[in-house]
Image (cartoon, rainbow, N blue to C red):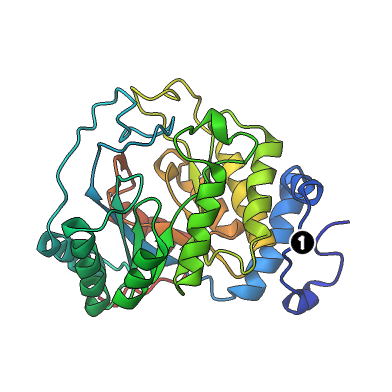
Amino acid sequence: MTLLDKKSSDVELLDVRHDWTLHEIQELLELPLMELLWQAQLVHRAVNPSYNVQLASLLSVKTGGCEEDCAYCPQSIHNSSDVSNQPNLDVDPVLEKAKAAKAAGADRFCMGWAWREIRNGEAFEAMLSMVRGVREIGLEACVTAGMLTDEQAFRLAEAGLTAYNHNLDTSPENYEQIITTRTFQERLETLHRVRSAGITICCGGIIGMGESITDRASLLKILATLNPHPESVPINALVPVEGTPLEQCQSVDPLEMVRMVATARILMPYSRVRLSAGREQLGREAQILCLQAGADSIFYGDSLLTTSNPEIEADRQLLSQAGVQVNWDF
């Protein structure tokens, strides 16, 4: 039985589910594409009838030197990519970047630290100042910086942090093939600490790392059975980087990204589904299909931490051609 065995006019009455099974999710992922798009469209039109798309900008505040051994990441000290360990950016330059992002149309500013975990001290105090400053500028503030303690989560909440990003990356079954320096359970515990502090969760994964369709379904099951669902679900396609263990992986078929976006929209109707890393490799038509399938946020700007992203003008043209609603009043 599929999700929408009822009239399209009844979609708005559907309850949000947190009891999805692996079998149900894999069935969705493997539907004929037109049927999957149809089901995703019914949900997307019900929850986002104006096709509003949020623009988020991402800045790497601390680049390189990460102690984790993530097989996809050029910032890991375990990998031989050419991303060097760089000092943290100071508060004022970060806030200038945030102002520029707002001027370009973004309404969420995301800041990344290549850390295994947040440590108390000068760098954490600077992070809190950045969060406060970004909120004062009038932007949502998101941070990704690895694991954290309950106290650190509450201090970030007090500073006004909107969201904390902590991706699961892949399924629990495939996880040790990608990362060995942090367990899957530790990732879930981090999400619990963030949620307990009253901060919204940004949590998704990456496809194209050699995983199976069942792995993709398993990843989505973890996300879709969280209660509440993550407010933001980034869907990433691997960008193979020289010097990482996954450098020889083939590019993801763009339609596989469309399938992941559509399925995520059906499973988590009110979450923002973010079209994230790998978007530059998708092409215009596949990106528009992802927007049609349920993506309602993109990262906006010419870089994502250490990988490239479409230029701002190209994104403006894309969103205009797609006919989605964006606040361009700047």
Which residue occupies the foreground of this view, 151 or 145?
A: 151
Q: Is residue 328 left or right of residue 282?
A: left
Q: Write the residue at 48% across / 32% down.
A: 180
How far across and down, in percent of the image, does residue 86 sit? 16, 40
The answer to whether residue 273 shows anywhere in this view is: no
Q: Residues within 10 Å of mark 1 (few under 14, many from 20)?
A: few
Q: Is residue 220 above or below residue 237?
A: below
Q: Quadrant of residue 225?
A: bottom right
Quadrant in which the C terminus is drawn: bottom left
Q: Which residue is mark 1?
A: 19
The answer to whether residue 171 shows anywhere in this view is: yes
Q: Write the residue at 40% across / 71% down.
A: 326
Which residue occupies the foreground of this view, 172 or 23?
A: 172
Q: Write the residue at 23% across / 79% down.
A: 136
Q: Tell me the kind of residue under disc 1.
A: Asp
How far across and down, in percent of the image, does residue 171 sit? 62, 41
How far across and down, in percent of the image, does residue 208 sit? 54, 33
Query: Could you tell me how many numbered marks the image carries?
Result: 1
Quadrant in which the N terminus is drawn: bottom right
Q: Is residue 211 above or below residue 222?
A: above
- Quick one: SS at disc 1? loop
Which residue occupies the foreground of this view, 190 or 44?
A: 190
Q: Is residue 225 left or right of residue 120?
A: right
